[in-house]
Image: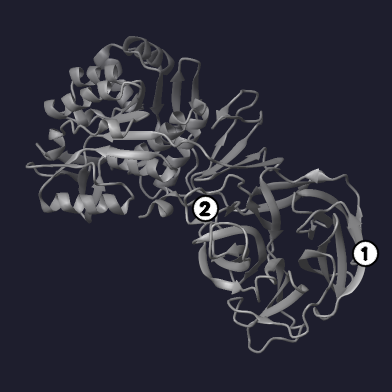
Amino acid sequence: MTTADSERPRYHFTARSGWLNDPNGLFQLDGTYHLYFQHNPAAPHWGNLHWGHAISEDLLHWRELPVALRPRSDKDLCYSGSAWVDRENHAGFQTGERPTILVYYTSTGRGECLAYSNDGGLTFQEYENNPVIRHRGRDPRILYHRESGYYVLVVYEEFNFAAFYRSSNLKDWEFCSRIHGFFECPELFDLDGRWVLFGANGRYSIGRFDGREFHPESLPAPLFEGEAYAGQSFSNCDRRIMIFWLRDREGFSGLPYNQQMTLPVELTLRDNAVRVTPAVVPPEAFVVHPGSRSLKLHGWDLPPAEELLIAEDTFSLEIFVNGGERYIVHPLHIRRPRILSFGEILIDRHPDGDRLGGAPVNLGAGLRALGAEVRLQGAVGTDPDGDWVLTQLAAKGLSPDSIQHNSHPTMVARVGRSADGENTFQFTSESASDHIRPDGTDAAFPADVVCFGTLARRSPESAATLATLKKTHAGARFFCDLNLRAPFYDEATIRRSLELADWLKLSAGEAAILSAMLNLPAAPEAFCRECAARYGLEAIVITRGADGGDVWTQEEFFHYDAAPAAKVAHTVGAGDAFSAGFLYYLACGASPRIAAAAGSARAAAAISG
């Protein structure tokens, strides 16, 4: 996996390479969403504009197709426009059984032009009588006005006007009217019986449209806050789904692609205002309920609200406030936390096959997926199992370069089931992971956080190496995911782990073990307060599965609810998934309530399979 691929946004569309800006020609046909976009395929900067093309079945995962429209020359570029599925063949271009796809776009050398496709939007042919409109402007938006029986083109007209044209055959267009106050990429549609008109900056008015003129009935209002631009909704779709260009003025430095789209959002009308919610919620999005509390995320103060739905990706942060009352969009450029994950690297040997395992690996993979810089410190044997582990690490995007080799066998955990349906683990008695040595490369990776569990301390050699990390990473926070595995812990192992830790995560069952073993209070808040005071801990989280969990910090104690899972396919990996989300956001300086909500969402996604 290349650096470019590992940093690529997961749910925000980016071009394979080159520059991207305005979404164009959005339509849905036979369950597939088509997204065209302003695109420079030759370089990651604006210019040389073509129409790129991508498709999706779920609005989260996109597959880029070959370029759809190409400029005729460097003086006749393909600027923005829109698409229409001509089901009734009113334009007369259809040659087969599939409906023709019409696109209207600005040709910088000619004006508003028409092209058509009879292969589902893959390739286009120019209309022989182009341009269909000549005027001082650009960005045609096609729609059908049912009441008048005419097609309408809304175009941006210099300076700061939206102009309306109409046609009965989609080829010959009559000027109707213009209205002042809408800049670039106009969008017009019927939303629950009211008409909404807005420009690229998202300022919209609600009103009436008679097929010739727009009559505003509300003052202009913002559809979003932040850096969205030039949004367009899908035609031939029974929901009003829109995508914006997520304008990033800083850009994606050093990568072969530049800029991204927002998440697809759904627009609805409520209380005489347009509401914006995700058209589909990414599995890593999470919900927090700040109320009047002041919560921070990546240096931003989040707004007071009953509910915030937060969707973060590699280069973006989108926040949906109170079910769509506000939509906040930011490009995201932060220093990603550096996290060293120390300990057992092993094979989970299930009856149906082998899987890469070990809390350090699972945690590292989860953190890497969120954007953290991750270094594994562990060991495998010089056996076939060790070779297999290294291959699997690389497939997960985790560098195997920092993994040590020694003469002991690679650790294996034989996975079974107890009588009550819980997973059981039978570990190799002595393994390569019990002989992790200081490797002298710590200075090259100044970690912000060092992660470990008690299984990493079951042997004196690995435990001693872990202790040296406290000196070589003196400025790091040490995160202990207790992860007790009988018979590889005792009171001394637990005490030393707590003494080494700054942040502690444990399950409710493990809290009960510590309460009895270390004479700590049983009540959660008292347990946390006494444990923190005794061992110098800054934060403690007790997970309770489907019942959420409790978080203690020096400022507050609170309970968090478990995020709902789409389905429960299994529970394997839920704890490590929670740890990844919780730790990542805590390491980024987010408020603990945000970290807990993010961890809970990651756990729910993990058990959904």
Q: Is residue 209 left or right of residue 121?
A: right
x and y percent of residue 129 in the render?
Answer: 78, 84
Earlier along the polypeptide chain: callout 1 or callout 2?
Answer: 2
> In the image, what residue type sits under mark 1?
Ser
Q: Is residue 558 above or below residue 427?
A: above
x and y percent of residue 349 in the render?
Answer: 19, 49
Q: Is residue 61 above or below residue 383?
A: below
Say whether marks 1 and 2 touch (CB < 8 Å): no
Q: Nearer the viewer, residue 210 or 521?
A: 210
Distance (Cα) linking label 1 and label 2: 39 Å
Residue wearing tag 2 = 11
Label of residue 95 in the image? none
SS at badge 1: strand
> In the image, what residue type sits under mark 2?
Tyr
Q: Mark yes or no: residue 98 visible.
A: yes
Residue 27 sits in which quadrant?
A: bottom right
Residue pictured at 77% horizontal, 66% vertical: 140
Q: Is residue 219 left or right of residue 184?
A: right
Q: In the image as oriented, which residue stretches furthest toward the bottom?
A: 95
Residue wearing tag 1 = 177
* Image color mode: one colour
Residue 125 sits in which quadrant?
A: bottom right
Q: Nearer the viewer, residue 127 or 83?
A: 127
Residue 191 sits in which quadrant?
A: bottom right
Q: Is residue 464 above or below residue 178?
A: above
Q: Is residue 444 left or right of residue 385?
A: right
Q: Quadrant of the N terminus?
A: bottom left
Q: Residues within 10 Å of mark 1 (few under 14, many from 20)?
A: some
Tag nearer the camera, 1 or 2 = 1
Q: Nearer the viewer, residue 505 or 231?
A: 231
